[in-house]
């Protein structure tokens, strides 16, 4: 929803917004946007009397507990910090959400008739990578995890990205925070999300439990 727009904007994005596709767009963001547009186009192409109920859930950066060692792309943020694979934190920020709250939103959208025909943003915890690192350090330092909390200069992050494919995914986000509203999910679905500290600590604990870190 929020990529490809003017980086100078201070507005809050909502479900009326779509990512603006361009040549400099990352493959991940582009594929998500193309896939959702294709889904809505398909629904719109069906005869109205045989059109199925349809809604989409658009989460932010997904944290929270993992079920096994397959921790997903979003989990790389916490894994890299706990493994100290970066000397510090890139200057990036996200709207984040707990995976359990994403699951709740999916169930609510499938069972609430008012969700039909709507898109939903599910992301409530705005914060930076430094914020995530500080939570991890406070919780896990006593267990031997020396999580880096200093902010890295942008030029150094770009250098690291030459060698690290995961770091390359954040280059478009350096120095920019996209603000989003989950008001529709809260009002239509009755969505009540967890806070940043809970989602970060629960992910850290589960990564330890499953031997990822």
Image (cartoon, grey):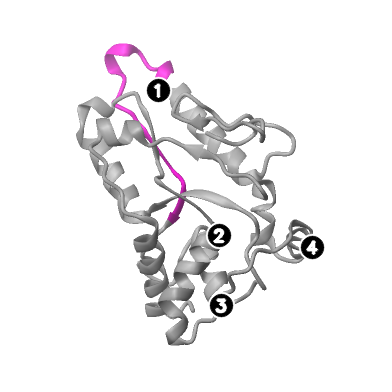
Instruction: Quadrant for residue 204, please give it.
Output: bottom left
Is tag 3's residue or tag 4's residue first in the polypeptide sequence? Answer: 3
**Is 57 one of the magenta-colored residues?**
yes
Task: Determine crowd level at label 4: few under 14, some 14-19, many 20+ residues with C-alpha closer than 10 A.
Answer: few
Of residues 25 and 61, the one drawn nearer to the viewer in this rendering = 61
**Residue that label 3 marks:** 83
Name the spot of residue 124 as percent of width and height, x first.
39, 45
Asked if marks 2 and 4 touch (Cβ < 8 Å), the reply is no
Residue 62 image position (x, y, % from top left):
44, 54
Q: What residue appears at the point 38 percent right and 68 percent down from the top-left corner?
A: 201
Looking at the image, can residue 71 be seen?
yes
Q: CA distance from mark 2 to mark 4?
A: 18 Å
Residue at numbered disc 1: 43
At label 2, counting other C-alpha atoms closer than 10 Å, the crowd grade (few under 14, some 14-19, many 20 or more) is many
- Asked if disc 3 and disc 1 are in contact, CB closer than 8 Å, the reply is no
**Is the residue marked by circle 3 packed among few (<14), some (14-19), or many (20+) residues within 10 Å?**
some
Q: Residue at x 74, y 57 (%)?
A: 154
Which residue occupies 73% across, 60% down?
Answer: 153
Residues in magenta, as a range: 44-62
* Residue where numbered disc 2 is placed: 129
Mark 4 = which residue? 159
């Amino acid at each position: 929803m929020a990529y490809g727009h003017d980086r100078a904007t201070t507005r809050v994005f909502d479900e009326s917004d779509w990512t603006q596709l361009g040549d400099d767009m990352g493959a991940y963001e582009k594929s998500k946007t193309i896939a959702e547009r294709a889904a809505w186009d398909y629904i719109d192409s069906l005869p109205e009397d045989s059109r199925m109920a349809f809604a989409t859930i658009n989460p932010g950066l997904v944290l929270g507990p993992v079920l096994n060692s397959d921790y997903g792309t979003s989990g790389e943020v916490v894994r890299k910090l706990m493994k100290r694979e970066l000397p510090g934190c890139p200057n990036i920020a996200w709207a984040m959400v707990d995976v359990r709250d994403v699951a709740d939103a999916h169930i609510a959208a499938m069972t609430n008739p008012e969700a039909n025909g709507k898109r939903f943003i599910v992301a409530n915890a705005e914060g930076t990578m430094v914020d995530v690192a500080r939570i991890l350090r406070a919780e896990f330092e006593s267990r031997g995890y020396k999580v880096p909390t200093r902010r890295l200069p942008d030029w150094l992050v770009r250098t690291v990205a030459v060698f690290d494919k995961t770091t390359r995914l954040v280059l478009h986000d350096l120095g920019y925070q996209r603000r989003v509203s989950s008001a529709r999910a809260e009002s239509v679905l009755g969505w009540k999300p967890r806070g940043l500290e809970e989602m970060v600590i629960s992910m850290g604990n589960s990564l330890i439990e499953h031997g990822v870190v």
